[in-house]
Structures are given as C-alpha cells and as structure tokens.
Image: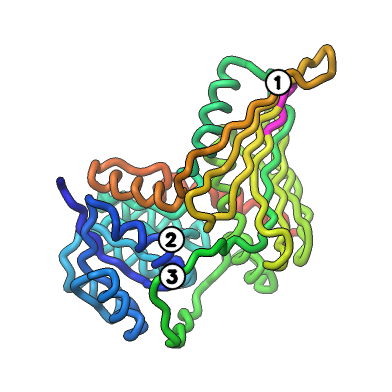
C-alpha cells in the first residue's frame, strides 16, 4: 500500500481532537513530523502519537522534513501565511477553515496551488456529512425529474451555540498560547468598526454559505441584509427563479446547544436537512422529504432518512488523503471554496452601506 508522508503543523484542540486522532489511524498515512510552537505540548504529542521528528515551527519543518503533504491546523489568523509558505514549498495541503480572512488572500493561495499543481483542501467537512450527500443527491434528482414541482424558496440557518460535545484533545499543557501577529482580518473596503464582526461571521457562518454553493448551481445575489450585532440577522438572497434567506444568530454556549440546517420548499413538498453540532462524533445529519397533495391541501407522504454513523471530520480527512494519492482535487478544494467569498463580500458590502 502506498503511504502518504504527512507533516503536521499545530497540535492544539482542533488539530488533535478533530484531525490528528483520525490521521494517526489511517493505514495509508505516515505522520513523519510535527511542528508546534509550545515545546512541552510538542514533546508530549510526539511521544503519545509516536511521531519521530519534532520542529519548533513550520518553517523548520518545511526546510528539513521530507514529506508529500502537510496538515496545518493553527489559529485562523495564522492560517493564510502558513498555508502560503507550505504551498510555496510545493507541498499538498489541508488547512482548517476559513482558508483566509479575505478573497484577496484566498485567491493568492489558490493561485499558488494551481501554479504548483498541488492538492489544496480546506476543512469544510459538512460536504462529507452522509446526510448532506444524501440531501444533495435527492435535490438534484427531484429537480431533474420535477418530482416536487418548482422551488418556492430556500432557507439556510445557523443558531450558533455550544458544539463541544464531549470531545477532548488527548494531550494538553498549561503553556501560554502565543498571540498571532497583527494581520488584516477583513477586506480593506470594510470599516474597521466591523472587522471583528466580519471575522466572527466568516468563522461561524462560512459553513452555511459553503452549503449554498454546494447545493445550488444558480448564481446567488444578496438583495438585502438586516444585521444585528447581538441578535438575529438575515440576508435575503436571489437565485433567479426563487428567493432564499440566510439566517444566523450567536447564542450563549449554555443555551439551546447548536442548530443548523437547510430547508428547501417546493410547490409540492419540502426537503429539509438538520445538521448535528460539528464536534458530535459519529453522528450524521438527518434528511426529511415531504410530498404534498396541492389540490387537497394536505401532506401525502413524509420520509425520514438518517445519515449513517460516520463523522464528517474523518470523512473529509480521508477525502484529502485519497485526493492526494490519486492526484485529483477534493470536493473541498481551495478552488471550490473560494467561490464562497462572492456571497460573503456581497453580504458585508450591504452591511457596510447601511
């Protein structure tokens, strides 16, 4: 079996709990080195995961380690620069989301990856949730065959609460986390008073915008935004033949947990996707399909389809490994994900104009 030699950058909570635990068990992967800024954490993780070589930082790893690919799971404010260094060093790359704070920075990464013919993937693991895949297949089939008639409207929503569902990193230390260097966290055209809110939105809501570009081929225009800093916000969308809405609200972590999903209303029924908290392991989402009798004004049939017992994080990690070994881009390639910035930028241009 051909094994992918992987270098690892970042051994914090998400790096370990969401990715390293999985990669360390893949039979077609050999983790050959780890870069972590915190020395005690680095040494303990090296020993616990049986990784042979440790490095003070990603630059040393890139200079000294022979590897095919790198997984970099670092503070989101560090992601762009570290990703740029890795892609420039001609290593295949998987990072967490967001790929970069702005479209300009994201395009730079996509261009470097393309120039060097690299597999470059971004951690939008929702695309690999079994229920998301089922919902997309159902949607495409029903639209093709007109099973439910025309789409009336679409709603994508997230109530961001607590999604840390009993998940822990194997190794932790009391070492101080280093503050990331000052960088541009928002587009130049956005007022500085909105930069922190923009960063928060991109970090949390980018998954839902990514589902929009995944489910629908139509161009999505943003018509209006009602933005409330500490409350419910909504963006009114136009897909041409049907409208839509993106709704988001940030909740205190101890209230109501996490709620996220997609509702697609048709003339003759509905497709609904309910998603679990991202860190809930081995639980996929759930799809429901409802058929209505338009003439009788009643529900005729409703089918519930539960996703299988897999975890989207692990599925997306496997997809990156397979893409790299096969030489084909993944569903969460940087070239795909960059499309999301068109919607993100248009939402925030409207917010900035009010």
Q: Residue at x 76, y 48 (%)?
A: 224
Could you tell me if residue 354 is visible in this image? no
- In depth, the one of 14 and 85 nearer the eye is 14
CA gap between label 1 and label 3 equals 44 Å
Magenta range: 264-269
Rendering quarter of residue 5? bottom left
In this rendering, position of residue 68 left or right of residue 57 = left
In this rendering, position of residue 216 left or right of residue 348 = left
Could you tell me if residue 290 is visible in this image? yes
Which mark is nearer the camera, 3 or 2? 3
102 vs 170: above or below = above
Render colour scheme? rainbow
212 vs 226: above or below = above
Q: Residue at x 26, y 48 (%)?
A: 324
Q: Which residue is mark 2?
A: 18
Question: Label 3's element?
Answer: loop
Q: Which residue is mark 3?
A: 169
Residue 193 location, x and y as percent? 69, 73
In this rendering, position of residue 339 left or right of residue 250 = left
Q: Which residue is mark 1?
A: 301
């Amino acid at each position: 079996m051909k094994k992918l030699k992987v270098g690892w950058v970042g051994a914090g909570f998400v790096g370990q709990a969401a990715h390293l635990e999985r990669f360390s068990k893949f039979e077609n992967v050999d983790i050959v080195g780890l870069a972590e800024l915190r020395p005690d954490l680095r040494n303990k993780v090296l020993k616990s995961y049986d990784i042979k070589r440790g490095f003070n930082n990603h630059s040393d790893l890139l200079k000294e380690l022979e590897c095919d690919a790198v997984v970099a799971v670092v503070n989101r404010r560090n992601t762009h620069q570290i990703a740029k260094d890795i892609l420039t060093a001609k290593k295949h790359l998987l990072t967490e989301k967001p790929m970069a704070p702005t479209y300009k920075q994201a395009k730079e990464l996509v261009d470097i990856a393309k120039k060097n013919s690299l597999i470059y993937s971004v951690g939008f693991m929702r695309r690999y949730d079994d229920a998301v895949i089922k919902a997309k297949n159902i949607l495409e089939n029903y639209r093709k065959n007109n099973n439910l008639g025309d789409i009336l409207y679409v709603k994508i929503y997230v109530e961001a609460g607590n999604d840390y569902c009993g998940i822990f990193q194997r190794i932790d230390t009391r070492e101080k986390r280093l503050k990331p260097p000052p960088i541009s966290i928002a587009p130049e055209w956005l007022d500085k008073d909105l930069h922190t809110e923009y960063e928060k939105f991109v970090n949390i809501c980018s998954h839902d915008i990514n589902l929009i570009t995944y489910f629908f081929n139509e161009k999505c225009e943003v018509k209006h935004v009602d933005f409330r800093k500490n409350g419910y916000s909504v963006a009114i969308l136009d897909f041409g033949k049907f409208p839509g809405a993106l709704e988001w609200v940030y909740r205190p972590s101890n209230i109501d947990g996490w709620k996220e999903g997609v509702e697609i209303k048709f003339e003759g029924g509905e497709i609904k996707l309910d998603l679990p908290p991202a860190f809930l392991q081995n639980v996929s989402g759930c799809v429901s399909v409802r058929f209505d009798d338009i003439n009788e004004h009643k529900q005729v049939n409703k089918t519930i389809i539960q996703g299988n017992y897999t975890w989207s994080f692990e599925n997306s990690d496997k997809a990156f490994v397979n893409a790299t070994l096969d030489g084909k881009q993944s569903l969460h390639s940087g070239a795909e994900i960059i499309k999301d910035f068109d919607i993100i930028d248009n939402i925030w241009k409207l917010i900035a104009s009010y």
